[in-house]
Image: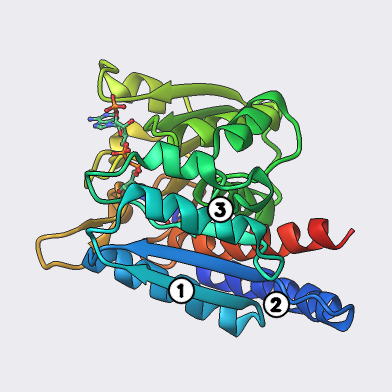
């Protein structure tokens, strides 16, 4: 069996069209959804990410501002900027691109963002809302994974999902979202002995490690759905995921490619969160 590809670009296009339509409806009421992206320092990867986020906003008809600061910006000055953005009615979502320079406490900066504008979903209030099943912003990458499962009509009730990775931005929120949809969830991490014992039992596997070939065909139950969050470089320098795509696609029923899988969905869900922040502010 060759797995069906879950195409993150195609799904993103559909969802972004919906965002653009809803943004137009808001504009007709005099409100343009706005995202502020704050970048401190000159990390080359971060520069690419923020550029892509700003462009995606513009393409969907959202207002976006990119605030760039030198790496030696003080934490106090950054906190003051966040405070000003919290108070700015033209801004509905605030994203502070991570990582921040070492002299800053990233968590402190994230906590300074108003939970109503926390479109990255990293604020402790957003994490708590997800944990307790209350409304709040979901972190974009695992949220995008949930949309991918929804796009194939996958019913998680009674299914066993294995999440590899337990970071605050991907693995843990992913596990909570799967749990909320009634999956039985196992979280694996670097101290998990014999990863394969767990993955072989899984109906759904989400790989979020940052290591090539962490998941190979012999570790996957035939017919499982495999979502690959990882972003790595192969020997030729090309972008690849955590999953041995060529092998696993012969065993899985559905699989996400890298590139063109979870990556575009992450930015799409940022647009969705920003739009929904604006819709909530408009009520
Ligand atoms: P992270 O904070 O480095 O977390 C990686 C997780 O993998 C940790 O929980 C770690 O366990 C676990 N791990 C490491 N080695 C392992 C092993 N041998 N077996 C099982 N688990 C292992 O990374 P992250 O931020 O979650 O990101 C994960 C990957 O997704 C990266 O490649 C990142 O670039 C990518 N990513 C992609 C997107 C996207 O839009 N596509 C967005 C975000 C991240 P411990 O907790 O025990 O250390």
Label annotation for residue 66:
1
In this rendering, the label closer to the viewer, 1 or 3: 3
The reply to whether the residue tagged 2 has its Cβ within 8 angstroms of ligand 1 is: no
Disc 2 target residue: 17
| Relative depth, front residue between 9 and 49 | 49
Q: CA gap, disc 2 to disc 3?
A: 32 Å
Query: Within 10 Å of the Cα at label 3, are there few (<14), some (14-19), or many (20+) other Cα atoms?
Result: some
Q: Position of residue 169 (x, y in %)?
A: 45, 40
In this rendering, the label closer to the viewer, 2 or 3: 3
Query: Within 10 Å of the Cα at label 1, are there few (<14), some (14-19), or many (20+) other Cα atoms?
Result: some
Name the residue located 48 percent from the left edge and 59 percent from the top edge. Answer: 81
Disc 3 target residue: 83
Q: Position of residue 93 (x, y in %)?
A: 62, 60
Relative to 13, say whether 223 is above or below: above
Q: Secondary structure at mark 3?
A: helix
Query: What quarter of the picture does the C terminus occupy?
Result: bottom right
Q: Earlier in the sequence, mark 1 or mark 3?
A: 1
Q: CA gap, disc 1 to disc 2?
A: 23 Å
Q: Earlier in the sequence, mark 2 or mark 3?
A: 2
Query: Within 10 Å of the Cα at label 2, are there few (<14), some (14-19), or many (20+) other Cα atoms?
Result: some
| Relative depth, front residue between 168 and 115 | 115
Relative to 244, say whether 196 is above or below: above
């Amino acid at each position: 069996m060759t797995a069906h590809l879950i195409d993150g670009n195609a799904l993103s296009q559909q969802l972004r069209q919906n965002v653009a339509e809803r943004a137009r409806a808001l504009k007709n009421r005099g409100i343009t959804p706005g995202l502020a992206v704050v970048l401190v320092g000159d990390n080359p990867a971060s520069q690419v990410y923020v550029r892509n986020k700003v462009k995606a906003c513009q393409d969907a008809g959202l207002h976006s501002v990119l605030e760039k600061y030198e790496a030696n910006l003080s934490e106090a000055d950054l906190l003051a900027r966040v405070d000003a953005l919290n108070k700015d009615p033209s801004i509905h979502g605030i994203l502070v691109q991570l990582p921040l320079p070492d002299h800053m406490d990233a968590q402190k900066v994230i906590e300074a963002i108003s939970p109503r504008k926390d479109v990255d979903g990293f604020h402790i209030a957003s994490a708590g809302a997800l944990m307790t099943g209350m409304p709040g912003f979901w972190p974009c990458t695992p949220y995008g994974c949930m949309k991918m499962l929804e796009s194939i009509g996958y019913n998680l009730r009674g299914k066993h999902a294995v999440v590899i990775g337990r970071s605050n931005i991907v693995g843990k929120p992913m596990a909570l979202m799967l749990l909320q949809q009634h999956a039985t969830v196992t979280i694996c991490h670097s101290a998990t002995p014999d990863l394969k014992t767990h993955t072989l039992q899984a109906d759904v596997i989400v790989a979020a490690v940052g290591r090539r070939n962490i998941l190979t065909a012999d570790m996957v139950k035939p017919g499982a759905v495999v979502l690959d969050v990882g972003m790595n470089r192969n020997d030729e320098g090309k972008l690849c995921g955590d999953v041995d795509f060529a092998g696993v696609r012969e065993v899985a029923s559905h699989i996400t490619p890298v590139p063109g899988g979870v990556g575009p969905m992450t930015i799409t869900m940022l647009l969705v969160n920003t739009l929904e922040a604006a819709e909530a502010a408009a009520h």
